[in-house]
Image (cartoon, rainbow, N blue to C red):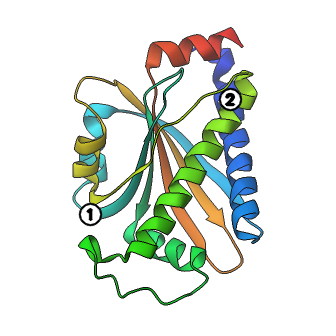
Amino acid sequence: MIDIRRLRTVNKLARAGASTVAEHLEQLTGVETEMQITRINVIEVDDLGTALGETKQVGVNIPLVERPYGSVLVLFEDASARRLANTMLGGMASDGGTTTGGYSEMERSAIREVGNIMTSGFIDGWANVLGRTIDISTPQLVRASGHDIVDHCIDPGEHEIAMVFDSTLKAPDADVEATIYSFPDIEEFVAMINDI
């Protein structure tokens, strides 16, 4: 549906989003941060739950309240989420993970905040390329199997495809792997890309 000549625009969106995420995280933490998008893919939403499987992961899901609508899900493997929380908390001892899912409230708050920063930065990068604003809603933290996270965050039949951005956050103390899933309203997204 996207004009083949516009595919480099999708790459430009990804690069701009990654750069803005790194800037926002660096401003928040004071730690030099780089974000690299290592791969961009498209997968049918119906196949996503199977692809993610039953391994427990940590996701931050944020709806978009303006075009291209839909939502963005930032997904971390458990080990990456723990490294991320530890880095954000500056190695401070948590309360031992006494809350549901084995994460302390401080850790959950740190992960939620980074997911929020990653999403807002990523979408701000898109907005800059598209020459518009794209507002987001309140982030929701979910820890479950990849399959259950998809079921929880995506209404059946609402979205046909997910745009998948494999990324690595690089910081002096820890590298964190994350995958960003964008579930745009496909007609709105295609129209926005083809209008550039």
Q: Which residue is drawn at 67% across and 54% down?
A: 36
From the top left corner, tell me how far across and down residue 53 is, in percent. Answer: 25, 54
Vertical arrangement, residue 9 with respect to residue 23, above or below: above
Q: Which residue in the protein does label 2 denote?
A: 127
Q: Nearer the viewer, mark 2 or mark 1?
A: 2
The percent coordinates of residue 51 (x first, y second) are 30, 47
Given the image, on which type of amino acid does mark 2 rest? Ala
- Give me the residue at 38% from left, 87% from top: 95
Q: Earlier in the sequence, mark 2 or mark 1?
A: 1
Residue 150, placed above or below residue 195: below
| Circles 2, 1 touching at the beta carbon (< 8 Å) | no
Q: Could you tell me which residue is drawn at 67 percent across and 42 percent down?
A: 17
Q: Which of 85 and 95 is in front in this view?
A: 95
Q: Residues within 10 Å of mark 2 (few under 14, many from 20)?
A: some
Rendered image quadrant of residue 12: top right
Q: Is residue 159 left or right of residue 185?
A: left
Point 32% across, 33% down: residue? 45
Q: Gap between marks 2 and 1, in whole Å? A: 33 Å
Q: Name the residue under label 1.
A: 55
Q: In the image, is 144 to the left or to the right of 2?
A: left
Q: In which quarter of the image is the C terminus?
A: top right
Q: Quadrant of residue 173?
A: bottom right
- Horizontal and vertical percent for residue 158? 29, 23
Callout 1 crowding tier (Cα within 10 Å): few <14, some 14–19, many ≥20? few
